[in-house]
Amino acid sequence: MLLPEQSAKWRSVEAREHKSHYLGENNMLNLFGSSVRASSLIGISLAALVAAQPVLAQDGASEEMLSGDIIVTASRRDTNIQDTPIAVSVTTGKALENNDVVSFQDLTRIAPSVVVNNQGAAGNQFIIRGILSDIGSTTGLYVDEMPLLGGSAVEGAGDGRPGLRLHDVERIEVLKGPQGSLFGSGSMAGTLRVMTNKPKLESVEGGGSASWGTIDKGSSIAQGDAYLNLPIGKMVAVRAVAWSEKGGAYIDHHITPLAGGGGFTTKDVNGRKVRGGRISVLIEPATDFSILLAGVHQEIDVDDSQSWNLNTGPFTSTSPTVEGYHDNYDSLAATFEYKPDYGTFSLIGTYANQRTEHPQDSTPTGLGLARSFNLTPFKTVFQTSQKFDAYTGEARFASALQGPMQFVVGGYYQHDSTDGLSVAFRANDGTGVAPCLTIAQCESTGHRQPGPPRPFLFPPNYFFPQNRYTPSSDVIYAVGNQRTIKQWALYGQVDVKLAETLTAIAGVRYFDAKIHDYGLQIQDIAGPPDFAVFPGSPVPSWAANGLITTPYVTQDGQASEKSPSYAFSLLYEASSDLSLFARVASGFRIGGTNNAAALAGQANITIPGSYGSDDLWSYELGAKAYLMDRHIYLDGSIYQMDWSRQQLEASDPSGAFEYVLNAGQTRIRGAELQLTYDSGSGFSIGGGINYTNAELTKNLDADVISAGTIGFKGDRVPRVPHWTAAAQARYEGKVSETVGFYLQSDITYRGSSTYSFNNLNTFNNPLKSFVMVGTRIGVKTEKFDFSIFAKNLTNSVAIFGLDASPDGVRAYSADPRTIGAQISAKF
C-alpha cells in the first residue's frame, strides 16, 4: 500500500480542508416514507400492472416454465428442478439483468431466502435459514466449479470472501439446508452457486451496459460492463467480460482533534472504485471432451469510512481517524470433462489469491491505554492486513445410466494459507491520517525506533519476507498470524428408483482436515518490565508507548478434524407437475486453534488450545408444483435444524485474551414459500416469503457467560429476522413491431432483529425492520434497451449490518434513494 500522500486511495489533508465544514452545518438526512406508504406504493404499482395485462395466453410464455425444464446442478449433475429432492431456488440471468442485480446484496431483492448482512463494498455475511456465525462462513459459495474461500486468521468485514460482482451470469442457484455431503465444509446452512455464461463455439456475440445515477444528498454513481464471445476455429472459443463501478458516496465524515477545536467535515467519503474482469477459454477437441479455463481479477478501493455512527444518526461518521479499504482478488480455474454415454468424468483444479487491507479507528481503545500507562493521548488506527492463498483439486464422476440407479462419487483436496497482520498505528491528531499503514512503510519512511533490525522466529511470509523487524515509533501494537489448512475428503451419493414415482437418495462425505496456527507478538502495547516472557527487560527512554519487545512466538499449535456428514431424501413424484420430498441432512464446519493460548498460559490464564467442528442436523418437508398449465411455479418447505457445539467468540475474565470455543445449542424452525407466475403475454410476477425462528435451547456455558457473552434458553439468535420477503412484477408490451416497452417494480422487506442475545450483553443494539421499493420503466428493441430507474424509492434507512465494539457502533446501510438511467446493447 502506498503512503497517503502517494495514493488517491487516501484523501490528502489539503483536499479534506478544502471540502470541510463544521458538523453543526450538517443536517441529518430527512427520511420520508414508511412501511405502510411503501406497501401502498408497491400495491398501486402491481395493481396497475395487473390491470394492464391481457387475458392469459399460452404462446409467448416462458419456455422453461411451460416445459418444466428448469435445470439445476444441486446434485452435481444436471437435473430437472422437479426431480431434485432439496429446496432450491433459481434466478435466471435474464432476471438478474432485468432487476439490475450486480452484487450479492442486490440478490436479496429477488431472493428472500438469502439474507446478506453487508459491511461495505466487499464485506458480506450470508445467512440461509437463520444459520449465522462471526467465526467463519456457514454458507458455501461457488462460481461455477470453484469454491470462493476466504481467510480466517484475522478479523475483517463479513466472512472474508471476495465480494465478486455478478456480470454475464447464466443463473444463480440457492441450495437451502445443509449441503455438506456434496459441497463440503462451510455449507452447513446451504450453498450459493453462481453459474456464469460459458464460451460458445457457434457464434460471435457481445454486449454491454452503462448506467449513471445520483444518490439523494450524495454523489453520483457510474457503472458499466461489457462482454464478448469469440469463436476461434471450430474447437476453441473465448468469452471475456469486464466491469467497473465508481462513486456512490453518501456518508460525511467529521474529524475532531483530541486537542480540541471544531475539526472539519469531508462530504461523501465512501465512494467506491471497482474494477474487474473474467476471461474463459473453451477447448473442445471432441464432442465428448472439453477443457474450460477461467481467470478472474477484481480490485475494490474505498476512500474512507463505509459506515456511520449509530449514535449520531444517518449518514455521519465521527470516527477520529481515516478508514479506507482495499481488496484485490485473483483466481484461476481449469475444468476437464469427459462425457461418454454412461456419465461425466470431471477433473477440476483452482487457485485463488486475495489481499485485503482494512484500517479502522481504534482511538477509544488507544485512549484507555494511554490513561493506563500515563501517556499523552493519541489517535489510533487499527489496521488488519491479510494475504490468502488457496489451492483446490477435485475429481468426480456423475453417472448417466440406463436403469433405476444413478450415482456421484468424488474426491476433494484443499490447501489454503492465511498470513495476517494486525497493527495499531498512531495517527495525526488534527487530520486523523496515519503517517504509515504497514510496518514496512514505517521502516522505509523513517518512522522507526533507533537500533538494528531484530531477527525473530517466524516463517518468512507475505508481510515479513526477510524475517527481520525494526521497531517503529508509530507502531503501538502488532501481532502476526499464519494459518494453514490442509483438507481432503471423499464423497458419494446414490439415487435409486424404488418405484416409478418414488426415489430414495443417500449421500455421505468423510473429511480429514489438519490446521496449523502460528502466532507472533511483534510489538507489545506496554507492560511491566518483569513480565514473564521478557523478565528484566528495560523500558527504553525512546520507546513511544512503554515497552518495545523483541518479537516472540505466542502460538505454534496444530489441530485435526475427522468427521462424516450425511444426507438422506425421499422424492415422491405424484405427477409431472407435482413432487413432494422429505430430507434429513447434516452439516459441519472445521475447527481450529486459539492463537492466544500460549501467551495466556504465560500469564497464568488457561484458555482452550483449540476448538472443534460444530454440528448441524436438518429435517425438512417440501413440495414443488406447476399450476395453471405451468404458468405458475410454486415451491415451499418447512424445516427444523438442530445446531450443537457452536463456535462462539469469548474472552477471559480480564478481557485480555480473545478465543473461540464450542458452546451453545440452537434450534431453528422455519417455513418458506416462493411463487413465480408468467402469463405468457408479457406479464410476470414472482416473490417469496420466509419465516425463521432461531433460538437457544439451553443456556450458554458458564465460562462463556463469565467471559461476557450472555445467552439463555429461549433467546433469539442475533441478527436473524423472523420474516423476510421480496416480490417483483414486470409487464412488457409493444409500441410497434420493432419497439417494445416495459414497466417493473420490486419490494423487499426484512424484519427486525438485535445485535446480541439479550440486553445483559454490552452491545444489544436493535436492527429495525425496513421496506425498500424500486421501480423501472424502459423501451427496447432487438439490440438496444434504455430505461430510467429509482432504487430505494422511499429513502429507507435500511441497516444491513452492525459492527459493535468499545470503539463504537458502526452501521452499514443501503444506498439512499438513487435515481438514474441505463442503456444496454447486444449483438
Image (spheres, grey):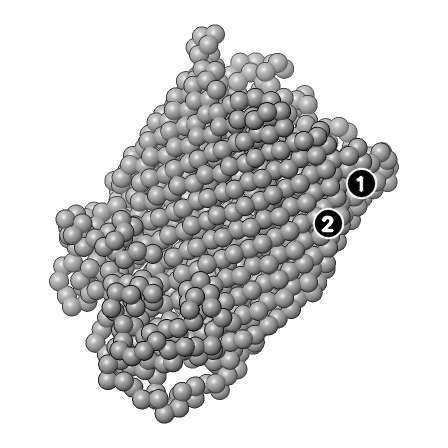
Judging by the rendered image, the residue that carries numbered circle 2 is 410
| 86 is higher (above) or lower (below) than 311 | above
Residue at x 67% of width, y 35% of height? 290
| 236 is higher (above) or lower (below) than 49 | below
Which residue lies most toward the top here? 737
Dot 1: element:
strand
**Location of residue 438 (image quadrant):** bottom left
Q: Please report contact status of discs 2 and 1: CB closer than 8 Å, yes or no.
A: no
Across and down, in percent, residue 223 comes to 37, 34
Amino acid type, residue under disc 2 in the picture: Gly
Residue at x 47% of width, y 53% of height? 354
Few, some or many residues within 10 Å of mark 2 (<14, 14–19, 20+): some
As drawn, is 103 to the left or to the right of 501? left
Across and down, in percent, residue 410 comes to 73, 49
Q: CA distance from mark 2 to mark 1?
A: 14 Å
Dot 2: element:
strand
As drawn, is 533 to the left or to the right of 428? right
The quarter of the rendered structure image containing the N terminus is bottom left
Amino acid type, residue under disc 1 in the picture: Gln
Give the mark toward the camera: 2 or 1: 2
Judging by the rendered image, the residue that carries numbered circle 1 is 406
Across and down, in percent, residue 702 comes to 55, 76
